[in-house]
Image: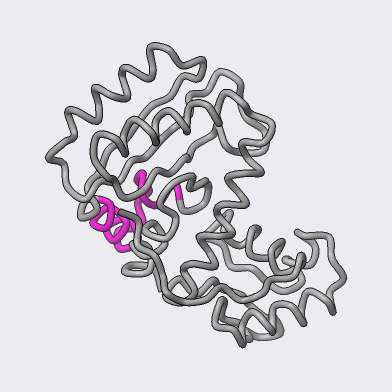
Amino acid sequence: MPKRSGARRPYLSRTAIAILKLMASDLTKDFTVRGLSQGIHQDYRITYETVDRLSKNGILNLERKAHLRICHLRLDRNIQTIAFIESLRTKEFSSSKPSIRILLSTVISRLTNLSPFLCLILFGSFIRPKTVSQSDLDILLVLSDLTLQSRVENELASVMRTSTVSFHEVILSADQFLSLLSQGRTERRPNVATELLGNHIVPYGAETFYSLLSRILP
């Protein structure tokens, strides 16, 4: 089951939520305070003060490089907070996509009835702001192990037959996901694990997803 943090989620202002949503949307990117200010359409001073508070709460790192102030999410701290941000991103993504909401609800229900799994991540061109209508929805399922892989594939095939959304699934064990992530970063070659860092939505198991990432990412 997805790991739950015992840490209490701190109060987040609207500006803080906007900053964290933007940073969570692309985990490969270095964000400057000015870039965040422009990205969320907020005054620089307010953005900086909010970033400073988030840094003091341990949610992100704020460091100076030359004349720039660079921000990084702290994946080793406040995972519950980042998972909350992911829930907002999922809600925002699916709010105008009823077919996606139905698909996700069906998949999650069918798979959790079959066996608890770790996380479900959407990635690929379908979830980018300018979606190509012909593209499939890419789904990554991370399982604790692959004992039930064939049964999971059968369940997904059954869902596909009645779904109005065409999707393509990738199924990995937690160990395989971590290995791909480590390999991709070491060899600097893209793979499914590194690709989704820059473009993802996590409808299920966000705490587990970020817990896994924290083992590899700085």
Identify the residue at image location x=38%, y=48%. Answer: 190
Instruction: For the N terminus, give its image quadrant.
Output: bottom left
Residue 99 drawn above or below residue 72: above
Instruction: For the C terminus, give its image quadrant.
Output: bottom left
Identify the residue at image location x=37%, y=40%. Answer: 140
Identify the residue at image location x=67%, y=74%. Answer: 11
Q: Residue furthest left?
A: 147
Q: Position of residue 123 (x, y in %)?
A: 48, 40
Q: Position of residue 118 (x, y in %)?
A: 31, 50
Residue 171 placement, left or right of 42: left
Main secondary structure along the magenta-highlighted residues: helix
**Number of numbered discs overlaid on the protein picture:** 0
Q: Is residue 186 magenta?
A: yes
Q: Position of residue 35 (x, y in %)?
A: 73, 66
Residue 179 drawn above or below residue 66: above
Q: Position of residue 21 (x, y in %)?
A: 64, 58
Identify the residue at image location x=49%, y=74%. Answer: 78
Residue 119 placement, left or right of 22: left
Q: Nearer the viewer, residue 217 or 212?
A: 212
When asked about the image quadrant of residue 126, the answer is: top right
Q: Is residue 44 magenta?
A: no
What span is in magenta? 177-196
Q: Nearer the viewer, residue 115 or 209?
A: 115
Q: Nearer the viewer, residue 107 or 182?
A: 107
The colour style of the image is: one colour
Q: Residue furthest top?
A: 161
Residue 114 drawn above or below residue 34: above
